Each structure stands twice: as structure tokens, then as C-alpha cells.
């Protein structure tokens, strides 16, 4: 497996609607774990081998949507934290785009997947066919 270096960017919707809330909730304990998560995203080929990173769309396409689990506090696991990140991997361009960052408490539906797929389709029309 290759270990390409990916450029990582956060889409403005993810920043404004969700990351802002994480920063407010976790205060000073947010920045270091978030930076570590971004570092892991830069080595995405390795990250997809770990538990907690699941492909949502067809792996054979150039653009693949993933759901990733992450933690902020050292005392929690990524899975039990309820923190999730939806990213788009652009293989040819070696880019990772952070589309959504949310906590399970942010979900406004009884079905998490339907909820975030609807958000991605509404905010990012370029990915609606990928889902």
C-alpha cells in the first residue's frame, strides 16, 4: 500500500457549523488532538487500515467518501466519543476534504447515516452522485 502525502482542507461549512462548536465545547483541549487527527488524514492510506474509518462510496472511484471516528479527550475511545468526520478522498489529486465534523448529539434524526448523507448532498452537490 502506498503512503501518499495528502493535502487536507476543511470546507467552510464544516468549519462554521460544526468545528466552531467543538472548539467552544472542548476549549483548550481541542487543538492538540484535532491537529493529530489532521496529521493522520495527511497519511490517509494508512488511516483507512485502522478501525473507525469506513468507506461509504465505491472504492474504485477517484473520489471516495469516508466516515472517520476521532476522539478529543485521552480518556475516551474514538468510537465511544461519538465524534465523527465525513471526508472526501480525491485520489488523483492527493486531497482530503473535510466535509462534516459532528458529534452524535448533533444528529437531528433517528438515523445517523441518512442525516449526514442528506447534509452532504445539500451542501456539496458535487458529491451527491458519489453517495
Image (spheres, grey):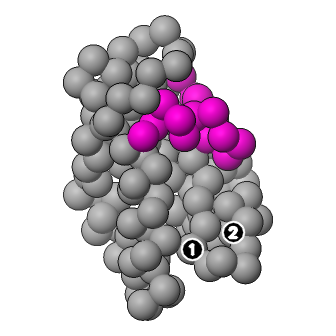
Q: Residue furthest bottom?
A: 28
Residue under pointer 2: 81
Residues drawn in magenta = 43-57
Q: Residue furthest top?
A: 60
Answer whether residue 54 is magenta in the image.
yes
Name above or below for residue 21 compared with residue 17: below
Question: Which secondary structure, mark 1?
Answer: loop
Assess disc 1: are there few (<14), some (14-19) or many (≥20) residues with their C-alpha within 10 Å of its C-alpha. many
Tell me where residue 81 sits by quadrant: bottom right
Query: Which numbered dot is residue 22?
Result: none
Query: Which numbered dot is residue 72?
Result: 1
Answer whether residue 122 is magenta in the image.
no
In the rendered structure, the answer to whether residue 41 lies left or right of residue 124 reads right
Task: Count the labels in the image.
Answer: 2
Real-space Cα separation, disc 2 to disc 1, in angstroms: 8 Å
Camera-nearest residue between 63 and 76: 76
Name above or below for residue 27 compared with residue 33: below
Mark toward the viewer: 2 or 1: 1
Residue drawn at x 43%, y 29% is 3
Q: Are marks 2 and 1 in contact (CB under 8 Å)?
A: yes
Q: Can residue 97 be seen by looking at this rendering?
A: no
* Residue 117 x %, y %: 51, 39
Assess disc 2: are there few (<14), some (14-19) or many (≥20) residues with their C-alpha within 10 Å of its C-alpha. some
Amino acid at each position: 500500500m502506498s503512503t501518499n502525502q495528502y493535502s487536507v482542507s476543511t470546507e467552510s461549512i464544516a468549519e462554521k457549523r460544526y468545528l466552531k462548536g467543538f472548539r467552544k465545547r472542548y476549549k483548550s483541549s481541542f487543538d492538540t488532538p484535532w491537529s493529530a487527527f489532521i496529521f493522520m488524514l495527511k497519511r490517509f492510506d494508512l488511516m483507512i487500515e485502522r478501525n473507525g474509518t469506513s468507506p461509504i462510496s465505491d472504492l474504485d472511484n477517484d473520489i471516495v467518501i469516508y466516515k472517520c471516528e476521532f476522539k478529543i479527550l485521552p480518556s475516551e475511545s474514538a468510537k465511544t466519543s461519538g465524534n465523527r468526520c465525513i471526508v472526501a478522498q480525491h485520489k488523483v489529486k492527493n486531497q482530503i476534504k473535510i466535509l462534516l465534523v459532528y458529534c452524535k448529539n448533533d444528529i437531528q434524526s433517528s438515523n445517523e447515516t441518512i442525516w449526514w448523507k442528506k447534509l452532504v448532498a445539500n451542501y456539496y452537490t458535487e458529491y451527491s452522485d458519489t453517495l
